[in-house]
Image (cartoon, rainbow, N blue to C red):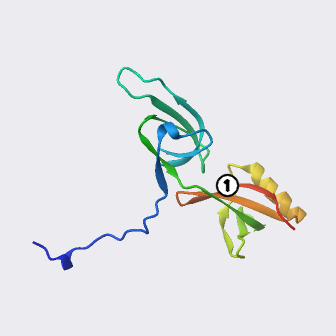
């Protein structure tokens, strides 16, 4: 038998998780859910009647928060699905380089320049360019889930 001193354990995190369980029947439209391990916003939700073999089924249609792809899943209404922890943070927009990377400042005056405006949203990129050109104070909203981040919108900030 091995001594306790010989045992090795993998390192564990702080106990915080990127998602939490929620019963399928409690999910609602415009909430977030993990479909195929991707964080999605629910755009359509329908429940079928209880069938011959028991459970009512919930049909969930969602759009991926980061790729905007449409994903679908069907789950018994009494089962749990994982819901991602989603946070929305606003940063002051300072600049954008030629590659589309933004220079952002949070409310504690910390600067970050690792977020890029995706090519999938050319209107957002044009909006940012025009606000920077006009020199108006601008705030950028960043959505974060499952260790991924995306810029979702910009708006006029406080002077």
Image coordinates of residue 82 in percent, x first then y, are 47, 48
Image coordinates of residue 60 in percent, x first then y, are 53, 35
Q: Looking at the image, which is closer to me, 14 or 26?
A: 26
Q: Secondary structure at mark 1?
A: loop
Image coordinates of residue 146 in percent, x first then y, are 52, 57
User: Where is mark 1, residue-wise?
Assistant: 118
Q: Looking at the image, which is closer to me, 8 or 15?
A: 15
- Residue 91 occupies quadrant: bottom right
Judge whether residue 97 can be spotted in this image: no
Q: Looking at the image, which is closer to me, 8 or 118?
A: 8
Residue sitting at x 72%, y 69%: 103
Looking at the picture, does residue 4 appear above or below residue 159? below
Q: Looking at the image, which is closer to me, 60 or 94?
A: 60
Farthest residue toward the top? Answer: 52
Judge whether residue 32 can be spotted in this image: yes
Farthest residue toward the left? Answer: 1
């Amino acid at each position: 038998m091995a001594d306790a001193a010989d045992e090795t354990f993998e390192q564990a995190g702080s106990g915080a998780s990127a998602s939490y369980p929620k019963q399928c029947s409690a999910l609602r439209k415009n909430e977030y859910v993990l479909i195929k391990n991707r964080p999605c916003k629910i755009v359509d939700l329908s429940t079928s009647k209880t069938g011959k073999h028991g459970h009512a089924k919930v049909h969930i249609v969602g759009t991926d928060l980061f790729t905007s792809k449409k994903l679908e899943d069907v789950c018994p209404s009494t089962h749990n699905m994982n819901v991602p922890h989603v946070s929305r943070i606003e940063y002051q927009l300072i600049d954008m380089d030629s590659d589309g990377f933004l220079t952002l400042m949070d409310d504690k005056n910390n600067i970050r320049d690792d977020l890029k405006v995706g090519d999938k949203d050319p209107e957002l990129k044009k909006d940012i360019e025009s606000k920077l050109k006009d020199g108006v104070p601008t705030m950028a909203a960043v959505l974060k889930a499952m260790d991924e981040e995306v810029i979702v919108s910009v708006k006029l900030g406080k002077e």
